[in-house]
Amino acid sequence: MSEPAVLVVGAGPAGLSAARQVARAGIGPVLVVERESSPGGVVRHCDHNGFGLQDLRRPLSGPAYARLLVNRAEAAGARILVSTTVADVAGDGGVQLVGPDGIRTVRPGLVVLATGARERPRTARLVPGDRPSGVFTTGQLQQWVAVRGLPVGRRAVVVGAEHVAYSAVLTLRHAGVSTVAMVTDLPRHQTLVAFAAATRTGLRVPLRTSSRVVCLHGHGRLESVDVEDLSTGRVERLEADTVVFTGDWVPDHDLARRAGLELDPGTLAPRTDGWGRTSRQGVVAVGNLVHPGETAGMAAVGGRAAARRLAATWPTGGTAAASGLSLVTAGPLRSVVPAVVDPTDPPRRLLLRTGSFGPARLVVARQGGSELGRHRLRHATPHRSLSVPGAVVAGADPDGGTVELTLV
């Protein structure tokens, strides 16, 4: 294998889309490194329809979508190396790979981090009680069902009501498990209305809003789940042998931290500009690593867009460190991506996240007390991206200090 010009870490939708775009631009060799035994990311375990709409404009099942992205990347000339872990991105540009053939160091001109995000498990959510079997995250459940073909249980409680929670319900249904309740601490669901309605009426799954799981019971196997109504304080015990903790995403940023990248305090992800460039020269971050909790299609679109812009200015543009005007959020807004912009060349859009439902739908950008721009949102839903045109910060003074985004 020749020394790669571009090394992509992670063979999920974002990494594969970025690799295909760079390889099509004639930059090569392009090497994609994946720690799992098969490429495609977690979507290859999602045996239901709905993937590909945002990037391919057609609906596909998870496995079909993953196969197509893999085939397109390889057809463009990218090579995919599985069962291989990136141990370190050293300061001198060397990248250490650990795989079945041992340890090897490569020196690519550009490293694209597309390591994705993961759900917080029960331990990170500090849910007390017994420690029985039958406790999953969505990713664990999908591997249990789709890869290993193991039995799950009969009655399940799903913790969460964002997009991925509804995917968990479909996986449980495929495994022959009845979902007795979905539980969210927010006042309503955070997915599309059609998804919520189909689950409530078609699958007959009740949604318990303003509620939380407060204890698990079971010796050997889960037997019941205690659910507290936050408005009344009443606790009800539900009989269930399975519980799935969904969402509550955190970026898989271990490699980024070891590489010394600056992290964004709102997302805990690498701080990037509109090109995906990080605080370190020659290192780019894309997909759910940068903005945890996006759909597979949105991650693929982001990876493709960043790779397209970087390829257009290769090699100088691809190796420049992120710099520019800093963006911060206030009020119910929790994060903005990208967190660094060039006001003379703003990104096509900014992605925001809010922490709560509310009537405020107008995003206002201000710098030094002066309003730069505003945009009215279609919705302000937690756990879902709020898309704002990058033009709202186009008039900012590069030397005028931080730009603040807030909801009014």
Image (tube, rainbow, N blue to C red):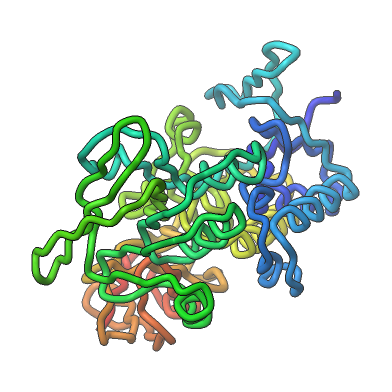
Occupied quadrant, residue 84: top right
Along the horizontal axis of the image, is 330 left or right of 354? Answer: left
Pinpoint residue 157: horizontal percent, then vertical percent: 38, 56
Residue sitting farthest toward the top: 102
Pinpoint residue 361: horizontal percent, then vertical percent: 33, 85
Q: Which residue lies at the image location 25% right of the left edge and 81% below the top edge? A: 358
Along the horizontal axis of the image, is 388 left or right of 319? Answer: left
347, above or below 141, in the image:
below
Q: Which residue lies at the image location 72% right of the left edge and 49% below the top edge? A: 16
Quadrant occupied by the N terminus: top right
Quadrant occupied by the C terminus: bottom left
84, above or below 280, in the image:
above
392, above or below 353, in the image:
below
Q: Which residue lies at the image location 61% right of the left edge and 45% below the top edge? A: 145
Q: Nearer the viewer, residue 3 or 257?
A: 257
Q: Nearer the viewer, residue 32 or 227?
A: 227
Asked if one can make out residue 78 in the rendered structure from this viewpoint, the answer is yes
Along the horizontal axis of the image, is 58 left or right of 252? Answer: right
224, above or below 181, in the image:
above
